[in-house]
Image (cartoon, rainbow, N blue to C red):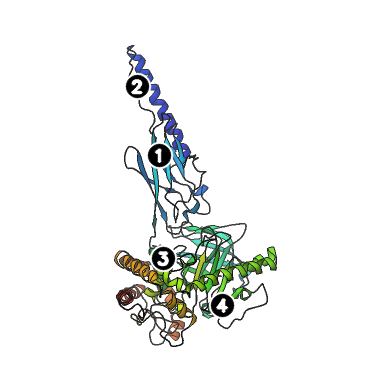
Amino acid sequence: MFNYTDEVMTRKLSILAVVVLALAACGGDGGGSSDPVGEMPAAKFTGFGFEASVNQPFLAADIEAEIVEDNHAAGTIMVTLPQGVNPKSLKPSFVTEAGVEVFVNGVRQTSGSDAHQFGGAAAPIAYTLRSADGRERSYVVRLRFVDPVPTVVTRLNVATDGGAPVLSKTERIKAKLTVDGQDHYAGMDAVAIEIKGRGNSTWTEPKKPYQIRFDKKVGAQPLLGLPAARKWILLANFVDNSMLTNAIAMKIGRLLDMPFTQHMMPVELTLNGQYLGLYMLTEQKEVAPNRIDIGDEGTYLELTVSDGRVPSADPNDEMHWFFNSRRGLHLPTQVKSPELEDMTKEQGLETAERRFAQIQAEFEAMEACVVSDEYLDNGCEAHLDLRSVAQFLIVQQLTRNWEVNHPKSVQLYRSSGEPYRLGPIWDFDWTFGGTSSNEHFLTRQTDALLSQSVDPLDGTRFFTRLLRSPALRQEFDEQWHAFRTEKLGELLTYTRLFAQTIQDSGAFERDYQRWHDLQDAKKPTRPRLTNATQYAGMAADWLLARAAYIDAVVQAMKLDPDSFRF
């Protein structure tokens, strides 16, 4: 991006030079011509963009916009942002001709200073420019997001202090992180971090997943072109021989414009000198400006079976903040944010318990509405955003994510005073017909998503009830039709290119050599393939068959809304 300060000075000098030359010309012939020296500077932008230096932690690099002059009175500013950038509060930097003032809703604007919400549910921001002689021109800012396929596999090297092993999901080990960006992303050299284990069943596998957190003194940092944050996840994908399932699922979410959908960035991880293979770096699921941006008063929940864990009397235990809903659906619910353990330490147990009770009451009000006749009539729009439910179900259907039946890893969130929205999506290990012992992309292309058991699980009952709403079925129909016709081809291309990247880099082969013996022992009927592009071909065939199945489901919903199989 050009330097806005230098650009302004250059334009001022240029205008001064024109005026001096014009005055000299007027005096040269002695005729005292009454013609005007020239028009006043036009009321228009000559530069517009977002500088990273004044938009931390949202931007990792400067963004320069395209200015389109639609006519003599109006223009459009096209801003292309990387997928994942939160446009909720960005400060634009801009350049105009000398003497031109800039306004938004009548309020004068200062370059690099005044922030606005440029995306989401907010109306497009309109700028009005006024020249010294009173002429005006308006500009509307339009956003477009790019979501490029990763073209390199970055290398991450983590060295813990004293070579300490990472053996726990609760104890953070101090370490140094070095990033080799492969001449594509910004690198790092021995930056202070902390590392710990993460995951539930995946932590028990030989290839471990991790969470890293930048040291407080280092602060939030961008990684691989993603907006700055302190916490990041390294997914091992041990049960996914293809290394593709989570990447495909997250791409579906982004193609559906589901807020806060994460990115899967392929990296090779070395820990204390030991090569651990191909991982996926992704954003930590947390409430934060560059993550799940719902504000301090928002609520972020997860519907997940307790897996034998029982509610705890200890407020420092996350199971203290777990409840089974009581208004008809018996949904196992974990409070993820606000972080009530921290609230207990900082504001006292009574404050945290009061907030917990409020969250439970709000959730159960939504549940009570869903099980009532009101839901069938109007979809309980004050409690639940049906567009988000339809998008969520498209992702789960297209990947056939069996986990929703339990439920497991079903996330939902709400900003204060707004309805619940399903998402962000997460956990796609048991999808595409695969499990920890069965290969992905081979079976179950035309199997129902929701269990047909006579004794359904809690998640099955919840989603079956949701699909009783005519409004939700209509929303699903419309959203699926748009995705099927406009986005499915892009998904298949993304899958092929993503696989090509991890294959051509040699990372897939190196990961195969490191882990295939143990993986083959878990899936003895289908040894791991040596080429990621073979899996991409299998994935494409599976997705096309699944899309045809969903087409049939949509037709069944219309023809037999009382007894269709989903």
How far apart marks 3 and 1 lie (CA) works out to 37 Å
* Disc 3 versus disc 1: nearer the observer: 3
Is residue 145 or residue 324 the one in the foreground?
324
Q: Quadrant of the C terminus?
A: bottom left
* Residue 344 in the figure: left or right of residue 524: right
Q: Say whether disc 2 or disc 1 marks the residue closer to the N-terminus.
A: 2
Q: Position of residue 239 (x, y in %)?
A: 45, 79
Q: Say whether disc 1 or disc 4 marks the residue closer to the N-terminus.
A: 1
How far apart marks 2 and 1 lie (CA) works out to 24 Å
Amino acid carrying label 2: it is Pro
Q: Say whether disc 3 or disc 2 marks the residue closer to the N-terminus.
A: 2
Residue under circle 3?
A: 387
* Residue 365 in the figure: left or right of residue 477: right
- The label shown at residue 45 is 1
Is residue 256 or residue 52 the one in the foreground?
256
Amino acid carrying label 1: it is Phe
Q: Secondary structure at mark 2?
A: loop
* Disc 4 versus disc 2: nearer the observer: 4
How far apart marks 4 and 2 lie (CA) works out to 80 Å
* Disc 4 versus disc 3: nearer the observer: 4
- Residue 8 lies in quadrant: top left
Q: Say whether disc 3 or disc 1 marks the residue closer to the N-terminus.
A: 1
- The label shown at residue 326 is 4
Q: Quadrant of the N terminus?
A: top left
Q: Secondary structure at mark 1?
A: strand
Q: Position of residue 425 (x, y in %)?
A: 46, 69
Residue under circle 2?
A: 36
Examine the rendered structure and indicate whether residue 399 appears above or below residue 222: below
Q: Secondary structure at mark 3?
A: helix
How far apart marks 4 and 3 lie (CA) works out to 25 Å
Amino acid carrying label 3: it is Arg
